[in-house]
Amino acid sequence: MKILITLLCLMNGLFLCSAQEKNSENKKFNQKLADSLGADNYGMKSYKIIILKTGAKDKEITDKTKKAELFNGHFANMEKMSKEGKLVVAGPFNDNHLKYRGIFILDVKTDEEAKNFIDQDPTVKAGVFDYEILPWYGSAALPLYLKYHDQVAKENP
């Protein structure tokens, strides 16, 4: 019994030491950067994920010139959202059974604000894409990756 109590005490001590290590402050923490990105104490923040799905009118638009025009507007809308600091991530999905076409992660507070940005997209207006809005909690540093994207992309779509 004495050995069991000793083992339990040791285990409890290890757990407390481990918990204290996990809760210790990050030596690399940069308050100014965290504040500029809107980070909470965990370096995280809330975003809105937009899942672009195949829209009801996608198959109806068969004119290649019209489709190219819509997608040029789609890319222009993404560029606008990016310049305004709202678009954090964007990209297409590979073919999938859910008919999901792409994703945006927006740095906005409300679904309504996200909807206002997405509803300006010509492909959404034309019914090529439909969408869903989901809340997401991720790293506040996520917007920093866009700063470097132009340095790794040889071509723009």
Image (cartoon, rainbow, N blue to C red):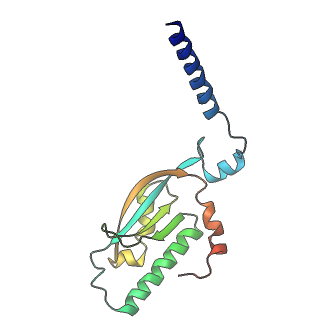
In this rendering, position of residue 136 left or right of residue 22 = left
The residue depicted at 54 percent of the width and 10 percent of the height is: 3
Count of numbered circles in the view: 0
**Position above or below: 64 against 17:** below
Residue 90 lies, in percent from the top left, at: 50, 68
The residue depicted at 67 percent of the width and 73 percent of the height is: 151
**Position above or below: 112 against 38:** below
* Residue that sits furthest to the top in the current view: 2
**Residue 155 occupies which quadrant of the picture?**
bottom right
Residue 63 lies, in percent from the top left, at: 34, 92
In this rendering, position of residue 153 left or right of residue 135 = right
The residue depicted at 60 percent of the width and 46 percent of the height is: 43
The residue depicted at 37 percent of the width and 91 percent of the height is: 64
Residue 143 lies, in percent from the top left, at: 59, 60
**Residue 53 occupies which quadrant of the picture?**
bottom left
Residue 4 lies, in percent from the top left, at: 50, 12
**Position above or below: 132 against 101:** above
**Position above or below: 138 against 63:** above
In this rendering, position of residue 114 left or right of residue 57 = right
Along the line of sight, the residue nearer the viewer: 29 or 95: 95
